Image (cartoon, rainbow, N blue to C red):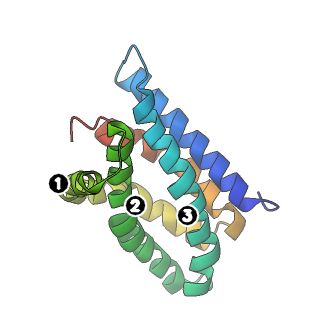
Amino acid sequence: TAARPLAAAVLITGTKTCVADIIVQKAWEKRAEIDWRRNAVFTLFGLGYLGAFQYFLYFKCFPRWFPGKSLMSTAKCVAFDQTVNTGIWYYPLFYVVQDAVMNGKFDGDTITEGSERYMRNITTDMVNCWKVWIPFQFINFSIVPLHWRAPYAACISFAWTCILSALRGDITKN
């Protein structure tokens, strides 16, 4: 990953989200057939947002915005990651991508419907997210080398994606 950190991040996160959703659909939900549209939501989101965008954020932006590995710098990384990145970027985009892929269209209604689900779920989503991510991101931003940050987050995110898939994967339930 040191030689090609972006490619590693995209490949790892895309694969991880795809596999995690399949596991939830088959093992947790006991579906006879995999919902491939739903799986495409997680795979595309994993490739684009979790892989490419978070590589850029963690590897390029955070070191400039929050230099060093002091407790204060780490706390700033975690605070930004768990408020702006997750609360303002991650969840709204997830719900819009989910609506677009599941309904096979992208228009004004897609943004409206995705935003409405975001607003209905944000409190529960953020609390669930913080329970998992705050401790692991403290480790990520204080110990993990820069080129391993996105892959490290992807490994933790395997469990998180299973949670998200189980709670929010079925667009008809939320």
User: Is residue 125 found left or right of 57 in the rendered image?
Assistant: left
Q: Residue 162: x percent and y percent? A: 42, 39
Q: CA distance from mark 2 to mark 1?
A: 15 Å
Does residue 145 appear in this view?
no
Alpha-carbon distance for marks 1 and 3? 25 Å
Dot 3, crowdedness within 10 Å: few (<14), some or many (≥20)? Answer: many
| Residue type, label 3 | Gln
Residue under numbered circle 3: 54
Q: Position of residue 135 (x, y in %)?
A: 45, 62
Can you give x and y, in whole percent of width and height, for residue 114 in the image?
27, 53
Could you tell me residue 120's position as x and y percent? 17, 54
Question: Position of 146 compared to 19: left or right?
Answer: right
Answer with the quarter of the image where residue 171 lies: top left
**Residue 165 sits in quarter:** top left
Q: Amino acid at mark 1?
A: Arg
Q: Which residue is mark 2?
A: 90
Contact between marks 1 and 3 (CB within 8 A): the answer is no
Question: Crowding near pointer 1: few (<14 within 10 Å), some, many (20+)?
Answer: few
Residue shown at the point (46%, 42%) measured from the top left: 42
Residue 120 is marked as 1
- Which sits in the foreground, 28 or 169? 169
**Residue in the picture at 59% in, 73% down:** 142
Q: Is residue 55 above or below residue 40?
A: below
Q: In this image, 25 relative to 70: left or right?
A: left
Query: Residue shown at 42%/64% (left/top)?
Result: 134
Q: Is residue 71 left or right of residue 94?
A: right
Give the structural element (helix, strand or loop) at label 2: helix
Say what amino acid the circle numbered 2 marks: Tyr
Label 3 and label 2: CA atoms lie apart by 10 Å
At mark 1, the secondary structure is helix
Q: Point out the tag, 1 or 3, that comes first from the N-terminus.
A: 3
CB-based contact (under 8 Å), mark 2 and mark 1? no
